[in-house]
Image (cartoon, rainbow, N blue to C red):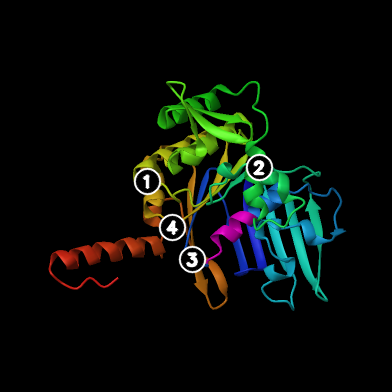
Amino acid sequence: MAIKKIELENFTVFENVAIDFCEGVNVFIGENGTGKTHLLKAISEICDSELPIENGYDVRLSKTFDCFNCPIINLIRNKKRETKVTLSTDKARYEIEIRYYDKMDAGKFIGHGFGGKRIPAVFVPAKEMLTHSGLEKDYIDRNLPFDVTLIDIINKAGISTLRTLPDEMCSIMTKIEQIIGGKVLYENNRYFIVKSDDIKIDFAVEAEGYKKLGLIYRMIETGNIAKGSVLIWDEPESNINPNNIPIIVNLLLELQRNGVQIFIATHSYDVARWFELNAVEGDKLRYFNLKKTDNGVKCSATAETYKSLSDSVIEDASDKLYNAVMKKMNGEQANG
């Protein structure tokens, strides 16, 4: 069930935005404060909801949008108007309406056609969390300073491994094993990479790039990433050696070839360009440029290739660095 479109009205930094997605890899680009993570979290929250069957189902929203770790009313851009988040798939449409009722978090779910079923999705936050395995046991009863996405990834990684996996997913896992030098092991609430010489390396002392690839490995072997699922990854380049970026890009491209819809937010020119360079005929790829305006954040440009995307802030940053290097080489003052 591919996600086709999201519409955000009066929601955080968005005044009124509608964005159409592709069934493959969707790449969001924008400077800080343009709502990239907000957009990803909104998609994730609706995907993970047990959607009501009937229309107009009134609820208290205290348990909705926990991914933002703040009162619901703080997500409303203008308190005088209702807020609406709408997600459309190829089969259905789902809306969340939030109204401000005298300082009380309240709202209305309006479900259309999902039949109460969730969309299988994984949200991978920029912060690495598997080394903190065990926090999920305290999260329910204690006031831990984490939003639900950080705990959710630990919960998803900690379930049992599937007995059998499709051949194409086994192939992807084998490629990850070759990169990280072994298999991922979950044992006694801790994660390890068991190297080819049977030495177990604790995630806590493993390289960040290997841990990120190991997380994807774990999501595949638990069945959280599978054909028909959605992978949402915030800043996959975070803490990654640039040499590993094309490896991660190739992994994501292969996942979309096997029926996984992907959403990522990035500040990295390398990530954006490697997707375009490594994509082959038949791959589905779409770029979105988010930009601040006087009327909230807008999607200022959309393109199927990065070179066709106008108004890219990461392109400007790359050009600025290149110009500074050239000035320095010519003996001029390079002002950042």
Question: Relative to residue 152, is residue 95 depicted above or below?
Answer: below
Q: Position of residue 66 (x, y in %)?
A: 71, 57
Asked whether, in this view, residue 159 is left or right of residue 238, the answer is right
Measure how far apart labels 3 and 4 are at the Cα level. 9 Å
Q: Nearer the viewer, mark 4 or mark 1?
A: 1
Kind of residue at badge 2: Gly
Q: Mark 4 sits on what residue? A: 267
How many residues crowd mark 4 within 10 Å: few (<14), some (14–19), many (20+)?
A: many
Kind of residue at badge 1: Asn
The mark found on residue 299 in the picture is: none
The mark found on residue 134 in the picture is: 2
Main SS class of the magenta portion in the image: helix
Per the rendered image, the range of residues in magenta is 34-41
For label 4, the SS is loop
Q: Earlier in the sequence, mark 4 or mark 1?
A: 1
Q: Earlier in the sequence, mark 1 or mark 3?
A: 3
Task: Report the residue at 47% width, 25% height from top.
Answer: 174
Q: Is residue 282 visible?
A: no
Measure how far apart labels 4 and 1 are at the Cα level. 14 Å
